Image (tube, rainbow, N blue to C red):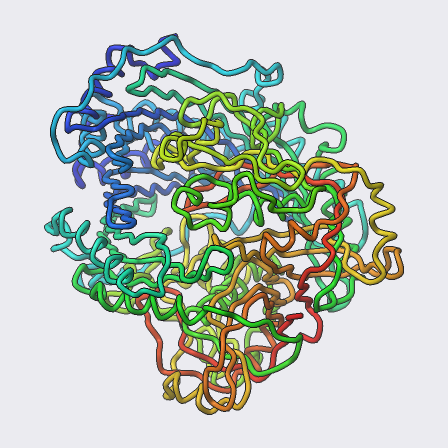
Amino acid sequence: MGPELSLGDLRLTAARLVDKALAAGAEEAEVHVTEGTEFTVDVRLGRIENLIQAGSRSLGLRVFLDRRAAHASSSDLSEDVLDGLVRRAVDRVRLAGSDPFSGLPESLEEPPDSDALGIFDPDLSSVEPRTKIETALLTERLALEDRRITNSHGSSLGTNASTVILANSKGFLRDFHLTHCSLSVGLQAGETDDRVEDFWFSSGVRWTELAPPELVARRAVERTVRLLRPKKIKTQRLPVLFEPLMTSWLLEFLFSCVSGTAVYQKASFLAGRRGERVGNSLVTVLDDGLLPGMPGTRPFDAEGVPCRRTTVIDKGVLKNFLCDAYSARKLGLRSTGNADGGGVGPNNFHLRPGSRNAADIIASTDRGLLVVKTLGHGLNPVTGDISRGAFGLWVEKGEIAFPVSEITISGNLGRILADIQDVGCDLDLAAGLSGPTIKVGEMTVAGT
Amino acid sequence: MEADLFGLTKGDLERALNFGLSRGGEFAELYFESRTHASIRLEDDIIKDTAESVVLGLGVRVIKDGQTGYGYTSDLSPDGIRAAASSAASVAGGGVGPRASLLSDVIRGREQESLKAFSHAAPLAVKIGLVREANEAARRFDRTVDKVKVSLSDFYQTVLIANSEGLLAVDQRPLLRLGCLVLAAKGDRREAGFSGGGGRVGLEGLAGAMSPAAIAVDAAREAVDLLEAREAPAGEMPVVLAGGHSGVLIHEAVGHLLEADFVRKKTSVFWNKLGRRVGSGQVTIFDDPTIPFYRGSYRVDDEGTVPAKTPLVEKGVLTGLLQDRLSARLLGRPLTGHGRRQDFTCYPLPRMSNIYIDRGEFDPEEIIRSVKKGLYAQRFTGGQVEDSGKFTFSVSSGRLIENGRLTSRVKQATLIGSNLDILMKMTMVGSDLAFSLQTGTCSKEGQDVPVTDGCPTLKISSLTVGGSLGA
């Protein structure tokens, strides 16, 4: 509650709360404030479905005493609520167990200048709601012009702007601003009882980075209609190709296996394997929090540790785990600037692209399956096992022959990393966690 | 009474509703939410962390010609409320809307005894004791138990809904969850097991089969059993779903596509099938938000509707849908009380609460005996469905069925199919209805809500199983 607060007021609130926590008996304290505005429009069949415009704030607090920890958070920034939150957190901290690894990061280096990172679009606030609504309407209309499209999930356009403030008892008090825009459209093709569906999207930090409606609509149509009239296939082992979005979910899974949290908990098949070969020489994986203008770029992480470029896998050799302060201490490493507020999160985590384009990789495949969509869970970081529902395109003599549905692909991430035979050049970093087209030598595809 | 209304008067609420209608909207609604959350996390035998969170806010919805405007704020001052109402109002292009009706007396839904004993008031030391009890029981279970994580979390949510048709409703919803994750190790092999319990109960709910020790032993047993499990087979085969946990299949494969927004948009494969046969005569499905103490239950939904047990499929015929106000109005169907939202920043959507396949006539033993070679699916890690009806779900542990008997344990398999197909292939439904752990959360359009699901032992005559074989 309470009246409008300026950035200066919010910085003061954060710094004052740190002081109050120390006065109440905490040895260390940290306060994180985010303030944001959201605009989202969903349109469907030429009309607005939802129009959301709002602003919100939230505050998070950590206190430490004798290597014990307590957390609190609130969306209500009124003084009496925050005072109560601090008091109770300091009371609670005494009930926690003493953990030699807990506490704020040791020494904080100077973070980079956030203005130079290009993560805020100052012109976004001047884009009229009307323009955003019309962009969404146009995207859907262009997609529906294709007669093979039989229904629409609608088109959405969203923009966000937020401010992050971090203060702690080591004298850290900084803020930065972020913007993000996205445009998407979801479609169906075919008749009710044998429909197929897919979508496409564009996203970026700046309004001008959004792909034109024509392009988003065309890609969504192509992706949807290529799934029409699928065939079933027999269970078999064969080469499997992953489109960039599919490589992204493999990387998402890989991230969960190199996150310091999973590693110290021994909940990752890569635990204890730093310095070892875990993939072949085509595999180089980086997490780069400083790439200018990218959605995962930040000057510092949720604990104030500067973001950086970390080589996770270098030509197949596991070099580093990604850590926050806690998991780093547990593993005897240093934080890599990947604290995300609740644990460890990716910055711009990606597989380094190769030189071949996707079309050449397909053309050089005699027989295989190109995975274009997956459905469900079925990932086990403890073992690296993958078993997941999928949609694909059958590749025969270098060409796409027909769509395939009701299959599951199964394998193991460790064996996939050792068996990558080709890495494409089509990496799109704007997707955040991302990878290019890849070809894996052999996996099990279960069908009928 | 005043506390119920978030410190506001009926007059304040009516003024805000009229402000929402001031640009020509037909319907306006206020959703006030106050929520506290407390949690405890144990790992490596120590209490790692305790946390508390406070959420307070308002969401304002205005509807004009089926179009929704939404604004939200955590600033509940008169200016904050006006700003949120003004954002929502802008969906209507202008003109004069109706005046809001005067608000009725408060609707509270049916009283439930246990909802009087709230765990959020219990001393932290007592809750820490329960967490330690679970940890110790898991540690004691077997010497292969290597790592134990326990979390206890309790929410207490108060909502107030007022709309321009004069409705005024409140609900108080406790939500308790104890979760236990166990890793077991033997040689090079590591496996995980999970179990949990809770619901809309106080700490007294963590007793019997849901006592901290029972939950921990259940999780530890799964992890330890998996150490001996074989890779699952792959291919098309009969699948028998164990009662209880298998409810996730009904949730994913059927429930989502009976949510009325997908039906009115005609994106659901069920949109043209009301009154038609969609499954075998053995299949009857209900969604019931009124089951006492269940995680998915509530006394009024997030639009103020008092919910009822809702038949969806009766003896194989599609007879009902899960409705929120907007879809019910656009489809000309009655409300069912399934309008739910994650929090005040979200507009309501038609959602499931506690969905289940009703008990059938077969003895569970007889169902297993009828299968020559197939998979018995026991535990799941989740699932997903497309509007087209294609679904997958992930089996974390199960058994092989060979010549009518349960044999080797198997791990990690994925089931994939299309929903109309499997509903028709549910050829035997058991008499042993059971519900899943009280830990489920369902995601839709980025909104998470607590749910429960259930089913008896049942046989699907043929389904594609993607095993972990040959990886």
Numbered disc total: 0
Residue A237, image x, y percentages = 64, 80
Q: Residue at x 84, y 61 (%)?
A: B408
Q: Is residue B245 above or below residue B383?
A: above
Confirm whether residue A279 shows in the render. no
How far across and how far down the image is residue B160, in percent?
38, 20
Looking at the figure, which quarter contains the C terminus of chain A? bottom right
Residue B368 against residue A218 in the figure, above or below: above
Rendered position, B415 above or below A251: above
Residue occupying image coordinates x 25% and y 52%: A157
Is B458 left, or right, of A99 in this rendering? right
Q: Position of residue A170 (x, y in %)?
A: 33, 47
Residue B413 position by quadrant: bottom right
Identified at 24% across, 38% down, the residue is A54
| Residue nearer the viewer, B121 or B277 | B277
In the visual, does A45 lie left or right of B342?
A: left
Give the image location of residue B458, x and y in percent. 75, 46
Camera-nearest residue between B202 and A235? A235
Closer to the camera, B301 or B179?
B301
**Closer to the camera in the image, A371 or A246:** A371
Whether residue B114 is visible: yes
Q: Can you say which quadrant of the picture contains the N terminus of chain A? A: top left
Please name the residue shown 64% across and 71% down the image: A446
Q: Is residue A374 left or right of residue A415?
A: left
Name the residue at the front extreme: B276
